[in-house]
Amino acid sequence: MTIGSHIIELKSTASTNIHAVKILEDERPEEGTVIITDEQTAGTGTDVNLWESEPGKNLTFSLIIYPDSLHPEKQFYLNKVFSLGLHDSLKEILPKAGISVKWPNDIYIEDKKVAGILIRNSIRDNTFNYSVIGIGVNVNQEIFRSDAPNPVSLKPYTGHDLDLKMVLQHVCNRCNERLLSLYKKDFHKLDWDYLRAQYRFGEHAEYIFQGNKIMATIRGVNEFGKLILELSGGRLLECDLKEVEFVL
């Protein structure tokens, strides 16, 4: 299995994730197949907002994997694998930039979002049937017009346009390495690296929890993917995605 060894290129599509699922209805392409498009007209992020991407300027793609050796209860490891793969690849391209993983699977440069992931899992009889990993990376876009609060691309940090195929190759290579670690059941390394890469890890900062502003410190992520926040008095909160919001 090598991510990116087979690439399906589309000029335009509503969503590469949707396109991948339609392919999977009729066939079972080789693991690691990538579906990439120049223009994605209805892509979404984890928060269901439209993923803004100027045609031909960024990476919008999905990849297909079959993690049938992974128990569905451990499916959050897919977030760890691909957010770390993205994190690793962008640090390779921008070694001096402050790149981190904002829980659960956004990639930040300092306080701005440069990439995101949307995972769609199919589980049958308590076993993975397939997973489609949708990835968006802002590469060469300079102006963002959507209501997204803090988008950024790689270009301001490089000072020039990057070759999209080169960036795709970096991302595929690093994601492949992280996925192989998962298949080897190296959970401890994935846990540790994911924690170390966390945006605001160990920092006292402001959050909105269940509609109320709080000051807290990220202490970890539990086995089910819940964010663990520590309040000033030492109380720990385990937060679902819809319960907590970072104040930026």
Image (cartoon, rainbow, N blue to C red):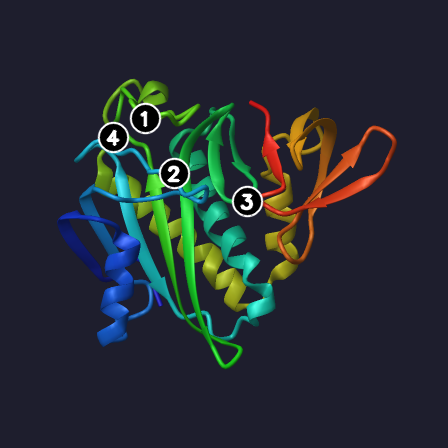
- Secondary structure of residue under mark 3: loop
Q: Which numbered circle lies on residue 104?
A: 3
Question: Residue furthest toward the left?
Answer: 11
Do residues under tags 4 and 2 come within 8 Å of each other at their CB atoms?
A: no
Q: Is residue 118 above or below residue 211?
A: below
Identity of the amino acid at label 4? Answer: Leu
Image quadrant assignment for residue 212: top right
Question: Residue furthest toward the bottom?
Answer: 125
Among the two numbered marks 2 and 3 on one chain, the one whose residue lies closer to the N terminus: 2
* CA separation in Å, label 1 and label 3: 22 Å
Q: Is residue 147 left or right of residue 25?
A: right
- Secondary structure of residue under mark 4: loop
Closest to the observer, 71 or 25? 25
Residue 71 at x, y percent in the picture: 57, 72
Residue under numbered circle 1:
146
Q: Nearer the viewer, mark 1 or mark 3?
A: 1
Q: Nearer the viewer, mark 4 or mark 2?
A: 2
Disc 2 crowd rating (10 Å Cα; few below 14, some 14-19, many 20+) is few
